[in-house]
């Protein structure tokens, strides 16, 4: 089961599931959707496929969704409305958007539509993030059009294609641009740290995918991404006493967690950086929690339609880390990251520093779909992430739409972002008795390296 925020990592994992499914049940290639204006015949086919996708998503919701009342939504009426819209849609993009919007209206962090593979790869070359209640540019890729036009970290994003990013809407923007409807560019209105407003038309790097995608190629692309991630810096040692661990995803195997904690146990203090970590596997979360307590810990309960079960982390016994612990979080820390940080707070095991987290804490399952003619290889894979359980903490509260408020809120200013300083990591080092300037901290895990 997954405890994960809406993210590119989840979409990639879903594509891996689809690829595996196709290897078992279909020929060695699949057709991607055409980006050209559809003929009447193509439009009829796409509408029919859209209706089939919508029906399967509805069936999955009725079978698996944790809330049988669907938050008060009249499911049959809502899907009937979507059916009518699909029958009037004029292109595939609209059709997929209608299916996606139907799930978005549940306002559930872990329930969303995963559309068929895109006909293009799009790289925007810059990254934005909510810091407090303000959206800032936090990274710009060298050599990108964004860099050429002078976009810089620390620029405040006032609007994106006419829409203001907020904590409530930013995930929808990222889902639309990165998953549902990749665009050749974005029009952004920014305000620089000196107060100047600029409107920029930023071009993306767009590469067309072949009309036929070989499954071996798809696997290789996913594995290449994983290899690139492995090259990113994962930890830093400050002298002999402090270990800084940048955990980007709760996707490690138990043995990998053991390897990292073996390194950390040799130090007096651990700074666990969960900023940007959207969550991951429950088994990884339980293994992590078990390393910080000398007794078994109940993390919370998963509440499904007909049953409620505790989620417990077994102590690692004599392998437990007994030193100081500081956890760093931000607005992109989601799901398993939030649960870990909150458990540390509730059990008074360490200090949490940074920004309020995403408030995206549910438990989900992925359910695939497949349309097309297997004999010809003209296949359309898609799927949906469905929340099958709410996660309730031991204090009776859910973090969904709430998030974790750090013990110490520490937000970088626009000027600090522009200078690529990391005041939160510097503060964490100070708390455990180490010397680390904000300038030096900003060089340890540069965001630019994470831009794909």
Image (cartoon, helix red, strand yellow):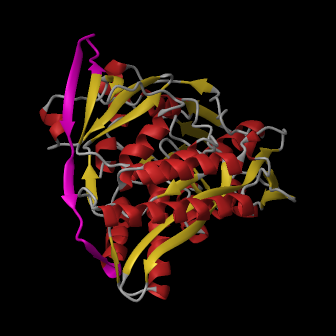
Residue extending farthest to the top is: 195
Pick the residue in front: 174 or 39: 39
Q: Is residue 385 left or right of residue 209?
A: right
At x 25%, y 56%, the residue is: 37
Residue extending farthest to the front is: 40
Q: Is residue 451 left or right of residue 335?
A: left
Pick the residue in front: 253 or 168: 168
Percent position of residue 29, x then y: 33, 81
Percent position of residue 340, x then y: 66, 47
Q: Quadrant of the N terminus?
A: bottom right
On the question of residue 47 being in view, the answer is: yes
Residue extending farthest to the right is: 307
On the question of residue 435 being in view, the answer is: no
Q: Is residue 8 left or right of residue 202?
A: right
Q: Is residue 213 magenta?
A: yes
Percent position of residue 2, x then y: 62, 60
Q: Is residue 198 magenta?
A: yes
Task: Give the quarter of the image for residue 309.
Answer: bottom right
- Quick check: 1 above or below 409? below
At x 84%, y 39%, the residue is: 396
Task: Give the quarter of the image for residue 147.
Answer: top left
Magenta residues (range)? 190-216
- Quick check: 144 above or below 279? above
At x 24%, y 29%, the residue is: 152
Number of on-image labels = 0
Percent position of residue 266, x then y: 56, 56
- Quick check: 191 above or below 57? above
- Quick check: 86 above or below 437? below
At x 60%, y 41%, the residue is: 105
């Amino acid at each position: 089961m997954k405890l994960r925020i809406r993210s590119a990592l989840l979409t990639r994992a879903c594509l891996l599931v689809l690829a595996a499914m196709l290897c078992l049940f279909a020929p060695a290639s699949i057709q991607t959707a055409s980006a050209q204006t559809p003929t009447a015949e193509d439009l009829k086919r796409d509408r029919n496929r859209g209706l089939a996708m919508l029906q399967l998503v509805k069936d999955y919701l009725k079978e698996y969704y944790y809330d049988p009342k669907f938050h008060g939504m009249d499911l049959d009426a809502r899907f009937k409305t979507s059916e009518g819209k699909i029958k009037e849609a004029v292109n595939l993009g609209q059709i997929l958007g209608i299916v996606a919007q139907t799930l978005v209206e549940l306002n559930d962090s872990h329930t969303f539509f995963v559309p068929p593979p895109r006909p293009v790869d799009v790289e925007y070359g810059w990254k934005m993030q909510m810091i407090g209640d303000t959206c800032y540019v936090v990274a710009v890729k060298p050599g990108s059009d964004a860099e050429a036009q002078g976009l810089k970290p620390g620029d405040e994003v006032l609007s994106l294609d006419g829409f203001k990013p907020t904590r409530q809407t930013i995930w929808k923007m990222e889902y639309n641009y990165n998953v549902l409807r990749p665009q050749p560019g974005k029009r952004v209105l920014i305000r620089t740290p000196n107060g100047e407003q600029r409107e920029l038309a930023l071009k993306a790097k767009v590469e067309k995918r072949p009309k036929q995608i070989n499954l071996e190629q798809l696997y290789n692309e996913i594995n290449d991404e994983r290899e690139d991630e492995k090259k990113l810096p994962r930890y830093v040692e400050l002298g002999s006493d402090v270990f800084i661990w940048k955990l980007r995803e709760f996707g490690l195997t138990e043995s990998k967690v053991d390897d990292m904690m073996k390194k950390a146990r040799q130090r007096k203090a651990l700074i666990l950086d969960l900023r940007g970590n959207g969550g991951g596997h429950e088994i990884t979360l339980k293994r992590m929690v078990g390393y910080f307590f000398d007794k078994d810990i109940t993390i919370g309960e998963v509440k499904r339609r007909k049953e409620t079960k505790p989620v417990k982390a077994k102590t690692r016994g004599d392998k437990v880390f007994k030193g100081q612990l500081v956890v760093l979080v931000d607005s992109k820390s989601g799901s398993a990251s939030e649960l870990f940080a909150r458990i540390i707070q509730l059990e008074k095991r360490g200090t949490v520093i940074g920004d309020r987290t995403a408030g995206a804490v549910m438990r989900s399952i992925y359910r695939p779909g497949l349309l097309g003619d297997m004999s010809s290889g003209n296949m359309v894979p898609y799927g949906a992430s469905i929340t099958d359980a709410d996660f309730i903490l031991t204090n009776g509260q859910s973090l969904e739409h709430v998030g974790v408020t750090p013990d110490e809120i520490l937000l970088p200013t626009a000027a600090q972002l522009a200078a690529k300083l990391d005041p939160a990591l510097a503060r964490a080092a100070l708390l455990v008795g180490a010397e680390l300037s904000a300038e030096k901290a900003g060089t340890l895990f540069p965001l630019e390296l994470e831009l794909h």
